[in-house]
Amino acid sequence: MSILERFLQTVTRSEKREVEFKHTIALRIQSALEEKKWLQRDLADKMNLSEARISYILKGEANLTLRAIARLEEALDTELLYTEQRQPEATEAFLQHLLQPQRTMVWPVTTHIPTLAQPNEEEYRVPFSLLAQRARQTAGV
């Protein structure tokens, strides 16, 4: 048995899926670039990233966050992650839930463990996600 064959036997299913995801997204980005007749430089400029970072992504080596994938989708005006069915009504319901004032994270000075704040607590309030903060700003809450 070759060294490569022995190595491949040690790779877990989740590691194989991770590589598959990275390469699938890289291929979809490359396809979108070709469709738009863009160079890597064009995408880098649009996203305010370096060409080296875009190259790293296109090689399938980048461990992209969901936020990074969403930014790529926006810049390319295409979907990179497909789900069986998008559910905008679920997103809307989630945003409405975030607008409820009692769902705020508190980071007390004496501990590093966050706790849910009571509505009357004022000190050390931090929205529990960037999405919650932006949703409140948008709604004027």
Image (spheres, helix red, strand yellow):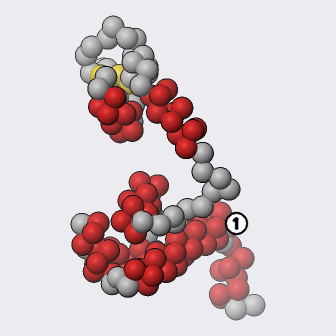
Depicted 67 relative to depicted 77: above or below: above
Depicted 127 relative to depicted 16: above or below: above
- Which of these two is toward me, 98 or 12? 98
Residue 31 is situated, as x and y percent measured from the top left of the image, at: 49, 80
> Which quadrant of the structure image shows residue 21?
bottom right
Residue shown at the point (39%, 61%) measured from the top left: 74
- Say whether residue 54 is left or right of residue 13: left
Say if residue 28 shows up in the picture. yes
- Which of these two is toward me, 4 or 43? 43
Residue shown at the point (36%, 65%) measured from the top left: 75
Quick one: SS at disc 1?
helix
Residue shown at the point (28%, 73%) measured from the top left: 44
Crowding at mark 1 (Cα within 10 Å: few <14, some 14-19, many 20+): few
Residue 35 is situated, as x and y percent measured from the top left of the image, at: 45, 82
Q: Residue furthest top?
A: 120
- Which of these two is toward me, 13 or 77? 77
Residue 101 is situated, as x and y percent measured from the top left of the image, at: 39, 18
Question: Which amino acid is tagged 1?
Answer: Arg
- Say whether residue 122 is left or right of residue 83: left
Q: Quadrant of the N terminus?
A: bottom right
> Which quadrant of the structure image shows residue 138?
top left
Depicted 139 relative to depicted 39: above or below: above
User: Which residue is under mark 1?
Assistant: 13
Say if residue 114 shows up in the picture. no
Residue 7 is situated, as x and y percent measured from the top left of the image, at: 65, 80
Residue shown at the point (34%, 29%) measured from the top left: 139
> Which quadrant of the structure image shows residue 19?
bottom right
Q: Residue furthest bottom?
A: 2
Q: Quadrant of the C terminus?
A: top left
- Say whether residue 84 is left or right of residue 131: right
